[in-house]
Image (spheres, coloured by chain):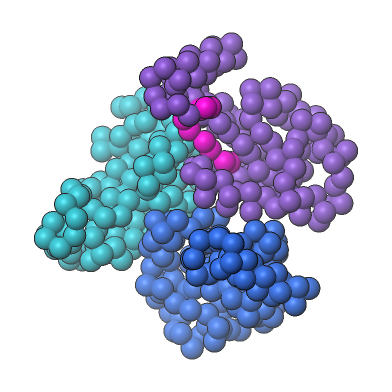
Chain colours: A purple, B cyan, C blue
Amino acid sequence: MKMILFSAAALALVFGFAGMSQTAGPKHHVAFQLSEAEGAAWDALPVHVNNTMKALAEDGGVQVEVVFWGPGIEMLRKTNSAYAERLKLLSEHGVKLLACRNAMKNRSLASEDLFPFAGEVDSGIAEIVRKQEAGWAYIH
Amino acid sequence: MKMILFSAAALALVFGFAGMSQTAGPKHHVAFQLSEAEGAAWDALPVHVNNTMKALAEDGGVQVEVVFWGPGIEMLRKTNSAYAERLKLLSEHGVKLLACRNAMKNRSLASEDLFPFAGEVDSGIAEIVRKQEAGWAYIH
Amino acid sequence: MKMILFSAAALALVFGFAGMSQTAGPKHHVAFQLSEAEGAAWDALPVHVNNTMKALAEDGGVQVEVVFWGPGIEMLRKTNSAYAERLKLLSEHGVKLLACRNAMKNRSLASEDLFPFAGEVDSGIAEIVRKQEAGWAYIH
């Protein structure tokens, strides 16, 4: 499944360069917000991201990032073993997982407390704002 | 009330063709996300869509679609008689009600299990992404 | 802290006029939706708005408005003393706090029932729609 996803993305890239305008990278861009505490939202996230990537793979591909804040920041805590594998897989598929430093501060979380594949942004909301301004779709 | 809505929309269309640029269709476009289980979100949806249509009817009109996924897909189940009339009315006013096929699959729902006026999309999130890219507003 | 915020905004304005295009006002625009009942969402709102303003203050500044509807409208009730000070501070920092008149009607709220610094819009959703159409980012 993952290989198919990659191949489709690669194909999309090739077609992108050959048949569309000379933009590098995927055609679609999506920023997900994950601000909920553990539960349905955590379970849904990897499913939603995967489904989105699959749906858009043959339509130019998609670049995805997920921004975590509020109680959602806990999902990135490296002791969160229940979700570690699923998040790591997303990261390996090119999905950026970004922790909001304001949320980290509120919960006294240091970079070392998060998964090594998690990135960080000063403000999760400002990150989403900038992405929307740059033409990214927003999903919450 | 519904007649007033229709008249206003008709007027908006007339003024649209006469006084604005020659774009076909309404001036505004909104994609609503309905991903919640039964409860407040289901009750609010028809009210929110109606209010939005009323508010924008005299300002060029609005095209609305609602995309259902997650537990929200259950709202479109044809056995959902409590909401059937309200959803049918929305559909009759031109609102597209779109089921996410990923959510249908997760819950073993076939097309026949949904209201006959429900549409379908491969991925609800990809649908919202494409609409945002096309300039539609997003409301969740 | 508040003085620093103001100074940064003033600086951003100066740099805005001097170094960027001749657009009046801040570079970023964000519309927040507050539609939840009392609880975590109410506590988070002032924090989120403040963090957003702080994060974007040195990047051209940000204009923020918050649109209240559904049970969220209750946050603007002038008897809501627990949040009065925090909301007033936001208002004094230039944040527009806008009540949806549909929600006011649903709950038999008159203008006099709301904080004197609250504004009003005919439809909260239509307001958010128009802001997104005007290039504002949307956060919910």
Q: Is residue C136 visible?
A: yes
Q: Residue at 53%, 27% (x, y): give it.
A: A25
The residue that appears at 35% across and 38% down in the rendered structure is B98
Q: Residue at x 65, y 58 (%)?
A: C59
Q: Vertical placement of B27 versus A95: above or below?
A: below
Q: Is residue B30 magenta?
A: no
Q: Is residue C68 visible?
A: no
Q: Position of residue C43 (x, y in %)?
A: 69, 65
Task: From this view, report whether residue B14 is shown above or below residue B91.
Answer: below
Where residue A55 sits: x, y (%)? 46, 25
In this view of the protein, which residue sits in the foreground, B105 or A3?
A3
Going 48% across and 47% down the picture, which residue do you hit? B38
Q: Position of residue B112 (x, y in %)?
A: 31, 27
C22 or C88, nearer to the observer: C22
Q: Which residues are magenta?
A: A24-32
Tell which of B20 and A69 is nearer to you: B20
- Which quadrant would the N terminus of chain A be assigned to in this image? top right
- Residue A128 location in percent, x, y? 59, 48
Residue A115 falls in image quadrant: top right
**Residue A117 against residue C38 in the figure, above or below:** above
Task: From the viewer's perspective, tell me whether residue B76 is left or right of residue A122.
Answer: left
Q: Is residue B133 left or right of residue B16?
A: right
